[in-house]
């Protein structure tokens, strides 16, 4: 049962401030503002304080005190999430905790292929540190310049290299986590094998700060690719894209790193709204794929191998057209087309997002079923279904009818979401493939999750956070009995 709570008492706030010390917090409204609204401005909350601890010990002391005071805690990374997990709720009942002062790279071990970093590190800084040691940290996200490792871990981030390297969960060797009672779970090791009981790391990865605060992680590094071949391919439909993926993987195996589906409308929107984007082909096609193959060894022949396979596809008319980037600038231009899609869709006007996954072989049928469902519900609406086809994950986004009434379209968001997610459920897919639950999809989790799984999740939450102080109302709700 959820109980309405009072804002945090002034005496409790004073206690927290003196614990954090000068420079250890923000309390001026203008300084707090960026922490209480999400980057898409869909969620807004209140917090009287942003804590800025600078060590694991400081996080531990803070959570111990928050538990004693019954103060809610909202962990906050780079604020690039899609589901409002890092935004406090309205009412001033929670403080925000930012680890931006914990941005140290603690160790790089090229021989062991690992890197140990604090949770406040920016993803790009970790990539750069890996590169300086002639290694690759493969997590690849459009928000790499501002998202943090703590946020990547807490949301189990995905991105455009999952096909080859997996999601954030797959890139973790060890974790350090501060529990809601202040205890520190120290599993910060680079062991590749460790079968000693339950694997607790995975409870915290993807928990969106609802079970504790990840303070540091030991991550996997990989050999740095020496060569890439990047292609943009035009084709008739998603089924042709799935066939191409099968063929490429059969021939080129794990070198296939990225396989992203792009519909014509997304290409049009990118070219219309984002400077520097242009159609690489003379004639339009209904669908495209951005694909990349990469090899750790000197890659002479990699481009030829890809070209031969694409040429075979052109001969059998499986593909309509294909370009292979001949320079770094061309490679960047092709990537730009893909990475500009979210911004371009935003600039086009009102849109609704659905981050779904289905087994890849069933995606083509799903796309057609979803398209006709949405067309029936909102004639003229524009499906912008793009993304990580290689992982079975599409951003099944919908833009309102061109020149239509944005407010009227958005007012139907809940109904359309329900229709899309019910369709996803009928395919035994996921309504949140890579963006998490946050505050946006709590009801969806309750509706679609297996009741046994939900029951276990609630039990784990109660065990680790009996007072319900960690990110209240996110992922699961109604577990704040003690507060
Ligand atoms: C992407 O793949 C991101 O570009 C954003 O996950 C997806 O804006 C979206 O819907
Ligand atoms: Zn995505």
Image (cartoon, rainbow, N blue to C red):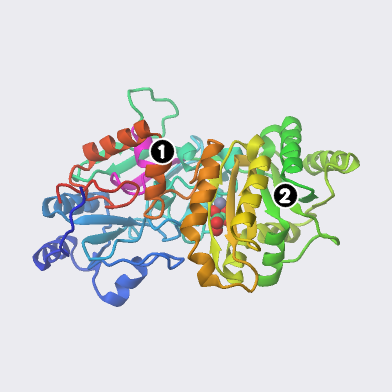
- The answer, for residue 299, to whether it is visible in the render is no
Quarter of image, ligand 1 = bottom right
Q: Earlier in the sequence, mark 1 or mark 2?
A: 2
Residue 20 in view, yes or no: yes
As drawn, 349 above or below 478: below
Q: Nearer the viewer, residue 29 or 401?
A: 401
Q: Quick one: 282 or 413, which is closer to the camera?
A: 413
Residue count near mark 1 (Cα–Cα under 10 Å), binned few <14, some 14–19, many ≥20: some
Magenta span contains residue 289: no
**Vertical placement of 184 versus 122: above or below?**
above
The one of 354 and 271 positioned closer to us in this rendering: 354
Horizontal side of residue 37 vs 15, given as left or right: right
Q: Position of residue 479 (x, y in %)?
A: 23, 46
Dot 1 falls on a residue whose secondary structure is loop
Of helix, strand and loop, which one carries label 2?
strand
Tell me which segment is drawn in magenta: 200-219
Q: Residue at x 38, y 64 (%)?
A: 43
Image location of residue 282, percent across then percent down: 86, 62
Of circles 1 and 2, which is in front? 1
Which residue occupies the extreme front position in the image? 376
The x and y percentages for residue 57 are 22, 49
At a point 50% along the width and 62% down the height, the residue shown is: 412
Contact, CB < 8 Å: mark 1 with mark 2? Answer: no
Residue 223, quarter of picture: top right
Label 1 lies in ligand 2 vicinity (Cβ under 8 Å): no
Q: CA distance from mark 1 to mark 2?
A: 32 Å
Q: Which residue, given by chain and number where applicable, does mark 2 sit on?
A: 289
For label 2, count other residues whose C-alpha is less than 10 Å away and answer few (under 14), some (14-19) or many (20+). many
Percent position (x, y) of residue 82?
46, 57
Mark 2 CB within 8 Å of ligand 1: no
Q: Which residue is mark 1?
A: 449
- On the picture, is 336 further left or further right than 248? left
């Amino acid at each position: 049962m959820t109980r309405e709570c009072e804002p945090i008492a002034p005496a409790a706030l004073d206690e927290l401030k003196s614990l954090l010390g000068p420079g250890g917090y923000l309390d001026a409204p203008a300084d707090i503002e960026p922490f209480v609204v999400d980057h898409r401005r869909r969620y807004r909350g209140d917090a009287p304080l942003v804590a800025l601890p600078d060590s694991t010990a400081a996080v531990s002391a803070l959570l111990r005190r928050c538990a004693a005071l019954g103060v809610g805690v909202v962990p906050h990374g780079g604020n690039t999430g899609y589901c409002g997990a890092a935004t406090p709720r309205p009412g001033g009942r929670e403080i925000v905790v930012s680890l931006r002062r914990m941005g140290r790279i603690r160790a790089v071990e090229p021989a062991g292929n690992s890197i140990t970093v604090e949770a406040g590190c920016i993803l790009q800084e970790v990539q750069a540190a890996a590169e300086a040691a002639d290694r690759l940290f493969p997590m690849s996200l459009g928000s790499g310049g501002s998202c943090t490792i703590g946020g990547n871990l807490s949301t189990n981030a995905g991105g455009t290299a999952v096909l080859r390297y997996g999601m954030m969960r797959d890139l973790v060797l060890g974790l350090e986590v501060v529990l809601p009672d202040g205890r520190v779970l120290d599993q910060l090791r680079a062991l590749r094998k460790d079968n000693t009981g339950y694997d607790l790391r995975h409870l915290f990865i993807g928990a969106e700060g609802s079970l504790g605060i990840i303070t540091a992680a030991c991550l996997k590094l990989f050999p740095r690719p020496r060569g890439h071949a990047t292609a943009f391919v035009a084709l008739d439909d998603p089924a042709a894209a799935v066939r191409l993926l099968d063929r490429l993987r059969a021939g080129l195996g794990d070198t296939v790193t990225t396989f992203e589906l792009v519909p014509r409308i997304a290409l049009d929107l990118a070219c219309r709204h984002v400077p520097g984007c242009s159609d690489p082909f003379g004639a339009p096609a209904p669908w495209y794929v951005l694909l990349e193959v990469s090899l750790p060894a000197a890659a002479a022949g990699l481009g030829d191998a890809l070209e031969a396979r694409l040429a075979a596809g052109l001969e059998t008319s499986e593909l309509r057209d294909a370009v292979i980037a001949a320079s770094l600038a061309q490679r960047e231009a092709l990537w730009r087309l893909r990475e500009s899609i979210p911004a371009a869709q935003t600039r086009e006007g009102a849109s609704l997002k659905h981050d779904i996954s289905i087994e890849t072989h069933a995606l083509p049928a799903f796309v057609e079923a979803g398209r006709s469902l949405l067309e029936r519900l909102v004639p003229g609406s524009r499906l912008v279904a793009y993304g990580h086809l290689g992982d079975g994950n599409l951003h099944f986004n919908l833009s309102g009818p061109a020149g239509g009434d944005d407010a009227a379209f958005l007012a139907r968001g809940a109904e359309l979401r329900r229709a899309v997610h019910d369709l996803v459920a009928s395919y035994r897919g996921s309504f949140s493939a890579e963006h998490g639950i946050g505050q946006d999809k709590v009801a969806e989790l309750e509706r679609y999750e297996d009741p046994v799984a939900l029951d276990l999740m609630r039990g784990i939450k109660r065990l680790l956070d009996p007072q319900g102080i960690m990110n209240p109302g996110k992922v699961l709700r109604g577990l704040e009995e003690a507060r």
